[in-house]
Amino acid sequence: MKKVVILGAGGHAREVLWVFEEQNKAEPRWEVLGFIDENTLNKGRDLCNLPILGDFGWFDKTASREVYVISGVGNCRTKLHFAEKAANLGLKFCSVVHPSVMMSSHVTVGAGTVIAAGSIITTQVKIANHVTVNLDCTISHDAVIEDYCTLAPGCHISGNVKFGEGVNFGTCATIIQGKSVGAWSKIGAGAVVIEDIPANVAAVGVPARIVREA
Ligand SMILES: CC(C)(COP(=O)(O)OP(=O)(O)OC[C@H]1O[C@@H](n2cnc3c(N)ncnc32)[C@H](O)[C@@H]1OP(=O)(O)O)[C@@H](O)C(=O)NCCC(=O)NCCS
C-alpha cells in the first residue's frame, strides 16, 4: 500500500478521501494517513476517523519521500500554492480516479489530479496536473484541460475545447465545441460558453458574458 496525505482539511478534502476509499474497495492501493491544515489550531482534530496531522511542518519530521500528497481543495490558486509548497519540500503528487469514472485508454491524467464519481471522459483528452474534475462531468474528444483547473459538479466540456491554467468552471457550466477559456478565468455556475473567453476574467450567464476581471 502506498501512503498518501491530503493537503487541506475542508469539505472537499473529505470528498477526496472518499475517492480514495472507493478506489481501495475496487483495488486496495492507498493508505491515507490524514490531512494537512495550515491552521495549526486544528492539529490533532479528527476528520472522518483520520487525524489532522498538522501544517506543512509535519513533513519535516517524516520520511516524506515515502509519502505521496494530493490537494484536497477546489480553489485553483490554493492548488497552485500547495503545489509550490510541496515542490519546495520535494514531495511527490499522486492522482486518484473514482472507480465509477468512465474513460478511454486515450486519456492522459497528470499528477495531483482528482476525478470524482460519475464523470465520463472520452478520447484523446489531456487532463494536466492538479486538475479537479468534480462529480458527474463530461469531457469530450480532444479537449485539453491545463494545470490547476477545477470543473465543478455537472460540467460539460465539448470536443476540442481548450482551458488554460487555473480555469474555474462553475457548477453545471457548459462550453460548446472548439472554444477556449484563458488562464485563471472564472465561469459562473450554469453558464453556457459559446465564444472564446480570454484570460483573467469572470463570465456568467447564457450565453456567457464577461462581468469583470478575475
Ligand atoms: C462567476 C462567479 C465566480 C462570480 O463571482 P463574483 O465575482 O463574486 O460575482 P458577483 O457575485 O459580484 O456577481 C457579478 C454579477 O454577475 C451575476 N452572477 C454571478 N454569478 C452568476 C451566475 N452563476 N449566473 C448568472 N449571473 C451571475 C451577479 O448577479 C452580478 O450581477 P449584477 O452585477 O447585475 O448584480 C460566481 O458567481 C460563480 O458562479 N461561481 C461558481 C460557483 C460554483 O459553481 N461553485 C462550485 C462549488 S463545488
Image: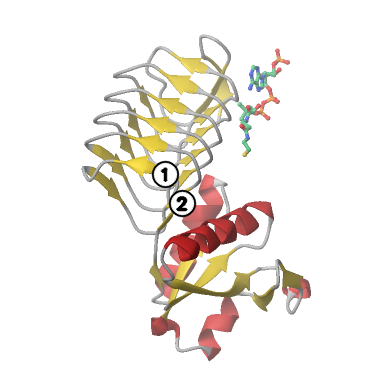
For the residue labelled by badge 2, is the local secondary structure a helix, a strand or a loop?
loop
Q: In the figure, residue 89 lies in which quadrant?
A: bottom left
Q: Is residue 83 above or below residue 102?
A: below
Q: Which residue is mark 1?
A: 101
Mark 1 residue's CB less than 8 Å from ligand 1:
no
* Image quarter (top left, top right, bottom left or bottom right) of the N terminus: bottom left
Q: Quadrant of ligand 1?
A: top right
Residue shown at 52% from the left, 58% from the top: 22
For disc 1, the neighbor class at 10 Å (few under 14, some 14 to 19, many from 20) is some
Determine whether, in the image, residue 206 is placed left or right of residue 14: left
The kind of residue on which mark 1 rests is Val
Q: In the figure, residue 176 lies in which quadrant?
A: top left
Closest to the observer: 214 or 107? 107
Where does the image place residue 105, in percent across and percent down from the top left?
22, 46
**Alpha carbons under labels 1 and 2: distance apart:** 6 Å
Q: Is residue 109 above or below residue 180?
A: below
For this orientation, the residue located farthest to the front is: 26
For disc 2, the neighbor class at 10 Å (few under 14, some 14 to 19, many from 20) is many
Where does the image place residue 178, in percent across and percent down from the top left?
29, 19
Q: Which residue is mark 2?
A: 98
Mark 2 residue's CB less than 8 Å from ligand 1:
no
Where does the image place residue 133, in percent across and percent down from the top left?
46, 42
Callout 1 touching callout 2 (CB < 8 Å): yes
Closest to the observer: 98 or 88? 98
For the residue labelled by badge 1, is the local secondary structure a helix, a strand or a loop?
loop
Where does the image place residue 127, in percent across and percent down from the top left?
33, 44
The kind of residue on which mark 2 rests is His
Residue shown at 56% from the left, 30% from the top: 170
* Image quarter (top left, top right, bottom left or bottom right) of the C terminus: top right
